[in-house]
Image: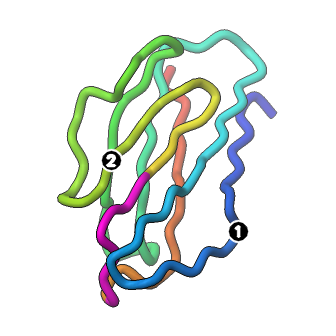
Amino acid sequence: GALQVSQDPGEAQVTVGGEVALVCRVLVSKPWDLLRLEWVKEVGRGVLCATRLSPSAHPPPEPCAPRLRLAWHPPRATLSLRQARGEDAGRYLCRVTLEI
């Protein structure tokens, strides 16, 4: 297809107070103007961070939740979580939509 999205690492363990970086690799086979990128924790519990990206946007314009930072270095969008807490445990999903 026109859009491929992959996440790395597949699983990570972080100690309380530590930091983790989650990478979302976005590959688009055709030229594009705008992507919507969202990081979601536990699907159905809301969006942690969302932004619209252009191929050359550095950094994303919208801020994320506290302790979260999003960096865009095409083709990678990295979500960094600082000062991890127990309630941060869970599944994180990178969701990408190619806007036409």
Lower sequence index among marks 1 and 2: 1
Up-down relation of residue 45 to residue 82 (above or below): below
Q: Amino acid type of disc 1?
A: Gly
Residue range highlighted in magenta = 80-86
Question: Where on the picture, by quarter, is residue 9?
Answer: bottom right
Q: Where does the image place residue 50, in percent across and percent down from the top left?
A: 33, 45
Q: Residue furthest right?
A: 1
Give me the residue at 71% from left, 34% from top.
3
Give me the residue at 42% from left, 54% from top.
80
Give me the residue at 29% from left, 70% from top.
83
Q: Where does the image place residue 34, in percent across and percent down from the top left?
A: 46, 20
Up-down relation of residue 44 to residue 64 (above or below): below
Residue 81 among magenta residues = yes
Indicate how the structure is coloured in the image. Answer: rainbow
Q: Which mark is residue 69?
A: 2
Q: Where does the image place residue 94, in percent across and percent down from the top left?
A: 53, 54
Position of residue 86 in the picture relative to residue 21 (left or right): left
**CB-based contact (under 8 Å), mark 1 and mark 2:** no
Q: Amino acid type of disc 2?
A: Arg
Q: Nearer the viewer, residue 2 or 71?
A: 71
* Image quadrant where one finds the N terminus: top right
